[in-house]
Image (cartoon, rainbow, N blue to C red):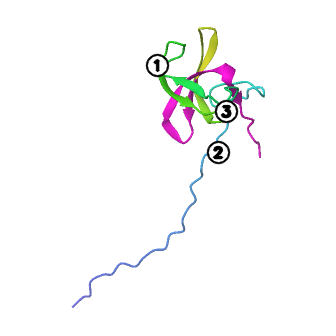
Amino acid sequence: MIAAPTLTPTVLNPTSTPTPTPTSIFFLPEGVIGVGIYVQVTGTGGSGLRMRGEPGLGGPINFSAMESEVFLVIDGPVTTDGYTWWHLEAPYDRDRNGWSAADFLTPIKEDVE
């Protein structure tokens, strides 16, 4: 009688998977808003900033962003109704997004390590 072969486990050394490091393709001057930049709602006197479904004063209001709330710029600029509009998205909720006027946005300085 011949014994059935048994599987001998082989120990594999885990390989580390590199994680991408976010880098900008281009650099904007400090204080300039652009796609990929984080901005903070400012200058609303505590009343918040209307986030609209499309750029312009006639765009439907999605919600009001709170003073000091931070958003990522995902599109723009669009100039209409005397304002420059940017499409913003909350970093913690992709459904919390809308168009807002640049007059009430301040770019957040990115810390470089």
Residue 97: give x, y in percent of width and height.
51, 30
Q: CA distance from mark 2 to mark 1?
A: 37 Å
* Camera-nearest label, 3 or 2: 3
Q: Is the residue under label 3 in contact with that under label 1 (CB below 8 Å)?
A: no
The amino acid type found where label 1 is placed reads Pro
Q: CA distance from mark 3 to mark 2?
A: 23 Å
From the viewer's side, name the closer residue of 65 and 8. 65
Residue designated by label 3? 40
Element on which disc 3 rests: strand
Residue 16 among magenta residues: no
Magenta stretch bounds: 87-113
Query: 42 above or below 102?
Result: below
Q: Is the residue under label 2 in contact with that under label 3 (CB below 8 Å)?
A: no
Residue designated by label 1? 60
Q: Is residue 9 left or right of residue 93?
A: left
Q: Is residue 13 left or right of residue 39?
A: left
The amino acid type found where label 2 is placed reads Thr
Element on which disc 1 rests: loop
**Which residue, as the protein is rendered here, is positioned at the far bottom?**
1
Among the two numbered marks 1 and 3 on one chain, the one whose residue lies closer to the N terminus:
3
Q: Is residue 4 left or right of residue 105?
A: left
From the viewer's side, name the closer residue of 72 and 9. 72
Residue 47: give x, y in percent of width and height.
62, 28
Q: CA distance from mark 1 to mark 3?
A: 21 Å
Residue 4: give x, y in percent of width and height.
26, 83
Among the two numbered marks 3 and 2 on one chain, the one whose residue lies closer to the N terminus:
2
Q: Which mark is residue 21?
A: 2
Q: Is residue 5 left or right of residue 56?
A: left
